[in-house]
Amino acid sequence: MQPKQQPLSLPDRLRGWRDRLIADPRFQRWSLGNPLTRWIARRSSRAMLDLCAGFVYSQVLFACVQLRLFDLLKDGPLTISEVAAKTVLSEDAARRLLHAASSLGLAQRRGEGRYGLGRLGAALLGSPEALALIEHQPMLYADLRDPVALLRGGEETALARYWPYSAAERPSALSAGEVGPYSALMAASQPMVAREALAVYGIEKHRRLLDVGGGEGVFLAEAAARAPALELELFDLPAVAERARARLEAAGLAGRARIFGGDFLKDELPRGADVISLVRIVHDHDDVTALALLRNARRALPEGGTLLIIEAISGEKGVEPLDAYYGFYTLAMGRGEPRTFEEIDALLRAAGFSRSKRLRTRLPVVASVIVATAA
């Protein structure tokens, strides 16, 4: 016997009417012909073009980065012939690349057959963190060749191999060679995250910071620069912890920092810190393992201690595409998902934290900050 279908609510009935109206070809033609609605129809058509062509856009961007086009244009406009010679492309190929890059705001036509940096190209040139992430994208593109197969699962992905801890039975046994590539990528992309988070949260109010999953110590070093009296601790997989030790020694912070190697899902975290940070860590884990990590952090903190979760948050204004990008990225990686503040707050309360609040950074697409108090 089929279950009785529940009646639709008024909002759902109204949305259904809207959907049927928009899907009607006659309404679409009318919208384009009506001066009052034409701008909406055009905007929708442009949004549909962006959805269809998005992969091509990203490949154009990747080609620009691979060919170092932004570096070539930073000292002034060049002709197509000059770009072709410097990138070892034919003039026809250079013309296609420059036209495509100009259409996306990465380059700009300057007249007399010359091309200079576009607004987005100039911004990328000043962001080595973003450039490092762009050069990392081909693995994700490879895993997305068949998105339906990815959704159904069952096959090993390039990203799962790149992030070996995501599938390893004993992550703490990973070698220096196995952790090297992803540790270097995280270190290259971390400064911007650290700057945004520490611009809105006063880390200098604390006595001792423990950065869990702290990678090569980039966040710890940024915090140290802002709070000269802050004691520093870092916990990560043993092979990663050794990379952090070397980086912090090179930065002159060896005397202020204690480094611990282990598995934060299985090993107890060191106690004594009054603030623990999890920078781009929680969204890399499913609910079960994220809750285990948060409970481990709670045990390490005194009552009234502070936990900082620093990562991009689903549902935030300005980062709406996060669920598309990071949702599929974590799927290819083999674990994790973007979460809303409410979903993270529920995990925090289950782990023994209270009074969670969200701090909005200047670039929420890079990271937001959630501050929670150990109950």
Image: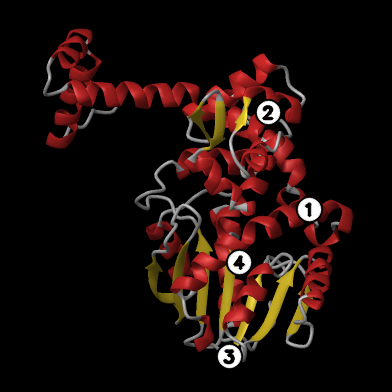
Quick one: SS at disc 2? Answer: helix
Per the model, the C-alpha gap separating discs 3 and 1 is 35 Å
Quick one: SS at disc 4? Answer: helix
Quick one: SS at disc 1? Answer: loop
Instruction: Identify the residue under disc 3.
Output: 207
Per the model, the C-alpha gap separating discs 4 and 2 is 50 Å
State which mark lies toward you, 3 or 2.
2
Q: Residue visible at 46% across and 66% down?
A: 369
Per the model, the C-alpha gap separating discs 1 and 2 is 49 Å
Q: Give the mark nearest the N terminus, 3 or 4.
A: 3
Q: Give the mark nearest the N terminus, 3 or 2.
A: 2
Q: Give the mark nearest the N terminus, 1 or 4.
A: 1
Q: Residue visible at 74% across and 30% down?
A: 86
Instruction: Identify the residue under disc 4.
Output: 293
Which residue type carries mark 4?
Leu
State which mark lies toward you, 3 or 4.
3
Q: Nearer the viewer, residue 157 or 231?
A: 231
Query: Which label was assigned to residue 169?
Result: 1
Quick one: SS at disc 3? Answer: loop
Determine whether, in the image, residue 343 is placed left or right of residue 36. Answer: right
Q: Give the mark nearest the N terminus, 3 or 1.
A: 1
Q: Is residue 171 visible?
A: yes
Which residue type carries mark 2?
Val
Question: Are the residues tagged 1 and 4 within 8 Å (C-beta)?
Answer: no
Q: Quadrant of the N terminus?
A: top left
